[in-house]
Image: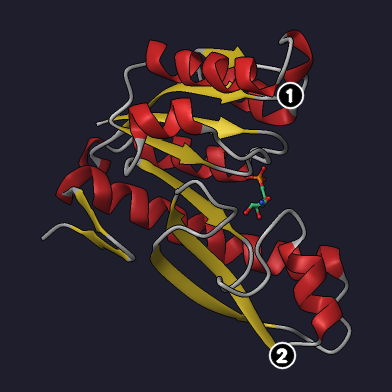
Amino acid sequence: GRLVVLVSGTGSNLAALLAAHDDPAFGARVVGVVSDRPGVRALDIARDAGVPTAVVSLKDFPDRAAWDVGIAEAMAVFAPDLVVEAGFMKILGAPSLERFGGRIVNTHPALLPSFPGAHGVRDALAYGVKVTGCSVIVIDEGVDSGPILAQEAVPVLPDDDEESLHERIKVVERRLLVDCVGRIAREGLRVDGRTAVIGG
Ligand code: GRF
């Protein structure tokens, strides 16, 4: 299967996918990386791995609607079977969902539907939960509202700050994301309302 990975930042989830795709048994290859921000470390990771990249920055478009079309077209160039949002910090619009709907997965550093949005770790900490975690979901038009594919719990420790908690979550998150993507590549993904099933 052909994977396109959407990134905005550090790229540790991308690095984990790139480490996995070297094994032919994984069933998928990262064929392109698309970033909404220039100069991020995730782009260096892609280039170092010899994977083609594209930057689709909001400031290069007249408005958000034009960017929505631009990012969908940038993805389409790579003809993906599956799109993976790995630390991608924007919400995809209708053009992307029309083309790739039901084939876009996202990883989120909280146990959805708790703490959606850009600050899932900070919000969980501020709320005072004792257990949080990560979620792999299929994207819909909402913010972290799509059907849940997989989740794993991570304890909040008494002296955690946002950074320490996020790092502990990310260790689990990378493993869960890579596992889900590989299983989707090998077994397929079926979405029916709020139910997302790998294989079957
Ligand atoms: C991940 O925790 C992701 O869920 C969150 O930002 C982090 C991205 O990490 N939204 P990286 O860029 O893959 O290292």
Q: Is 63 left, or right, of 70 in this rendering? A: right
Q: Secondary structure at mark 1?
A: loop
Instruction: Specify whether residue 151 is in view.
Output: yes
Question: Is 132 placed above or below 69 here?
Answer: below
> Residue beneath label 2, please?
130
Mark 2: which amino acid? Lys
Q: Residue shown at 33%/40% (left/top)?
A: 103
Sort mark 2 into few (<14), some (14-19) or many (20+) by Cα contacts within 10 Å.
few
Seen from the viewer's position, the closer of residues 9 and 120 is 120
Sort mark 1 into few (<14), some (14-19) or many (20+) by Cα contacts within 10 Å.
some
Name the N-terminal-most of marks 1 and 2.
Answer: 1
Q: Estimate the x, y position of residue 137 in percent, counting from the top left.
A: 44, 57
> Residue beneath label 1, please?
37
Question: Quarter of the image holding residue 160?
Answer: bottom right
Q: Residue shown at 46%/35% (left/top)?
A: 18
Q: How far apart are the two marked residues, 1 and 2, measured between alpha carbons? A: 34 Å
Mark 1: which amino acid? Arg
Q: Residue shown at 84%/67% (left/top)?
A: 162
Q: Is 134 left, or right, of 4 in this rendering? A: right
Seen from the viewer's position, the closer of residues 87 and 118 is 118
The image quadrant where one finds the N terminus is top left
Question: Is 16 placed above or below 6 here?
Answer: below
Q: Estimate the x, y position of residue 175 in percent, counting from the top left.
A: 47, 59
